[in-house]
Image (cartoon, grey):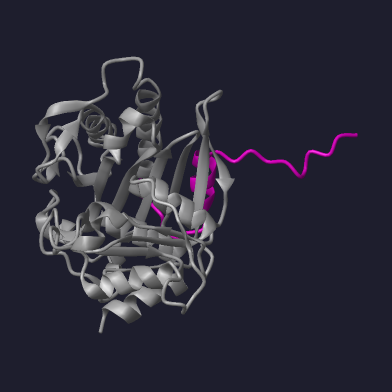
Amino acid sequence: MVNHTDTSVVTIERFIIEQERLIPHATGELSGIMYDLALASKMIANKVRLAGLVDILGEEGSDNVQGEAQQKLDVIANTIIVKALDHGGRLCAMASEEEAEIIPIPPQFRRGKYLLLFDPLDGSSNIDVNVPVGTIFSVLEKVTDGEDGTLEDMLQKGAAQVAAGYVIYGASTMLVYTTGQGVHGFTLDPSIGEFLLSHPNMRIPEHGRYLSVNESYEQLWSDDVRALIRRYRGLDGKREAMNVRYVGSLVADFHRNLLGGGIFAYPANAKSPNGKLRLLYECNPLAFIVEAAGGAATNGRGRILDVQPTELHQRSPYFVGSRADVAIATEMLAT
C-alpha cells in the first residue's frame, strides 16, 4: 500500500491562505497583493527566458530618474508590475526605481490601504551576458488620510514594512518573501506554471562563508572601509578569510548569502559619498527579509530599518547578511 501522508505539494496560493488563517481579522488584501506579484513575476520570467530570442535586450534609449541608461527589459518589467497591480483595489499608490514620481492608481479603480515600492528588474545590465537578475518589492500600509497614497506614506522607516520579497530569475525562478514572521521561498515549476514551496522557514547562518563586494572601488574607499574589507578577507589576521563571491547583481548575491551565509557590502566611496543602492527599493526590503531570517543590515552607522527616509530615491551605503559579520561592519565603521 502506498503511503501518501509524507508528501505534500504546497502552492504559493495555498501557503498564503494558510498563513492568512493564522492572523485574526485578516482582510485578504495583502494576500491579494502577493498573488498579483506572483503573476507579474511569471510574466517577467517568461520575458527574461526569451531575452536572447526576441529584440528585448540592450538599452531602451532613455535614462531613469537616477540618470542610468534604461534597459528594454527594465521598462517591460516595470509596465508588467504596474498593470498587474493597479486595478485590484488593494493599493493606493506605487513607486518604482524606474520612475521619478509616485505612480497613482488610475481614477477608475478603487483604492486600498497598501503601497507598493519596487525595483522591477535589479541587475538588468547583466541580462546580455545571462547573469541572474531579479525583482525586489516592499509593501507599506498607508498612514495619511484620504484615498490616494502620498509621499509621506512612502517615506516610512523600513521597520514599518508589512511585507517584502524578491524574485530571482536564474537557472530556476524563485520568489522569496516575508511578512516579518519567517522567510519562505517558492520555486516556479514551469510545467504547471505554479510557484511551489521549496524553502520553508529560511534562516541565514550566524557567521558566513561569502563576502560580496566590488573591490574595483577600493581606491575610492575611506581608510576604515578598506580596513573592514581586509578584516573580512582575513588579511589583518583577526579572523578566518571569507570567500569572495561577487556577481554584480544584488538579488543574486543576496540570495546566495541568504542560503550559505555571508555579507554583501556596497560602501560609500569618493564618487558616491551617500552610497549607491536605493534605500526604499533595495536596502529596506532586503533588510526586512534578512532580519526575519536571523540576519542583520546596516548603513555602517546603525540599523537600516531605523533610517528615516527623506526622499523617494534616496541612496545609502549597505552591509547586509549574517548577523555576526554585519556586527563587524557596525563596530569598525560607526566609531
Residue in the foreground of this view, choosing between 227 and 115 = 227
Q: Is residue 258 above or below residue 230?
A: above
The residue at 68%/41% (across/down) is 8
Q: Quarter of the image for the C terminus: give it.
A: bottom left
> How many numbered marks, from 0 up?
0
The residue at 45%/43% (across/down) is 175
Image location of residue 126, percent across then percent down: 31, 36
Residue 192 visible in image: yes
The magenta-colored residue range is 1-30
Does residue 279 appear left or right of residue 186 in this picture?
left
User: Which residue appears farthest toward the right when viewing the image?
Assistant: 1
The residue at 25%/63% (across/down) is 267
User: Which residue appears farthest toward the top when viewing the image?
Assistant: 54
Residue 19: in magenta span: yes
Could you tell me what secondary structure mostly forms the magenta stretch?
Answer: loop
Image location of residue 71, percent across then percent down: 21, 31
Residue 20 visible in image: no
Does residue 254 appear left or right of residue 335 in this picture?
right
Residue 16: in magenta span: yes
Residue in the foreground of this view, choosing between 81 and 3 = 81
Does residue 293 appear left or right of residue 326 in this picture?
right
- Indicate the quadrant where residue 234 lies: bottom left
The residue at 14%/51% (across/down) is 149
Image location of residue 112, percent across then percent down: 24, 47
Q: Is residue 159 above or below residue 121?
A: below
Q: Quarter of the image for the N terminus: give it.
A: top right
Image location of residue 75, percent across then percent down: 20, 30
Does residue 309 appear left or right of residue 330 in this picture?
left
